[in-house]
Image: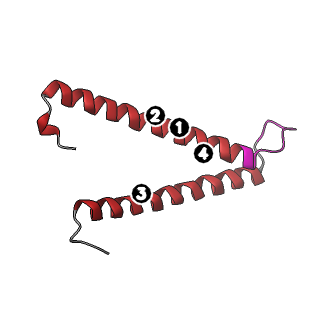
Amino acid sequence: MEYSRFNQAEQMEINNLLEQKQMDDFVNTFTNVVDRCFRQCANDFTTKAVTGREAKCVHSCADKFLKHAELVATRFSELSQNLTNPAIQR
């Protein structure tokens, strides 16, 4: 986005909106990961303690999500770079 066409107050408002959107996206993503991993891994409610199997499952679930998110971010970055500089095609 070309910010120079906006005055300083508008630029600040745009930045605030972008920051709020990023925070909302982070909270939604975190909530979805917690929900997905809980549903997948927590299935023994006879004790308060987290079992070893549950802990391993949650770790695996979260790790899988983080690796997926990293892959998506890398691919998005590559596509974005290709769109902004079409001379560099992979």
Compared to residue 18, the image places residue 72 above or below, namely below
Find disc 4 in the rendering and name its residue. 33
Find disc 3 in the rendering and name its residue. 73
For the C terminus, the quadrant is bottom left
How many residues crowd mark 1 within 10 Å: few (<14), some (14–19), many (20+)? few
Q: CA distance from mark 4 to mark 3?
A: 17 Å
Q: CA distance from mark 4 to mark 1?
A: 9 Å
In contact (CB < 8 Å): disc 1 and disc 2: yes
Residue depicted at x 47% and y 62%: 71
Q: Nearer the viewer, mark 4 or mark 2?
A: 2
Find disc 2 in the rendering and name its residue. 24
Q: CA distance from mark 1 to mark 2?
A: 6 Å
**Under tag 2, what secondary structure?**
helix
- Residue type, numbered disc 3: Ala
Q: Main secondary structure of the magenta part?
A: loop
With 69 as the anchor, is 63 left or right in this view?
A: right
In contact (CB < 8 Å): disc 4 and disc 2: no
Q: CA distance from mark 4 to mark 2?
A: 14 Å
Q: In the depicted view, which residue is nearer to us: 48 or 13?
A: 13
Residue 11 quadrant: top left
In contact (CB < 8 Å): disc 3 and disc 2: no
For the N terminus, the quadrant is top left
Q: Which residues are magenta?
A: 39-49
- Residue type, numbered disc 2: Asp
With 77 as the anchor, is 36 left or right in this view?
A: right
How many residues crowd mark 4 within 10 Å: few (<14), some (14–19), many (20+)? some
Residue depicted at x 81% and y 45%: 43
Which of the two discs, 3 and 2, labels the residue nearer the N terminus? 2
Which of the two discs, 1 and 3, labels the residue nearer the N terminus? 1
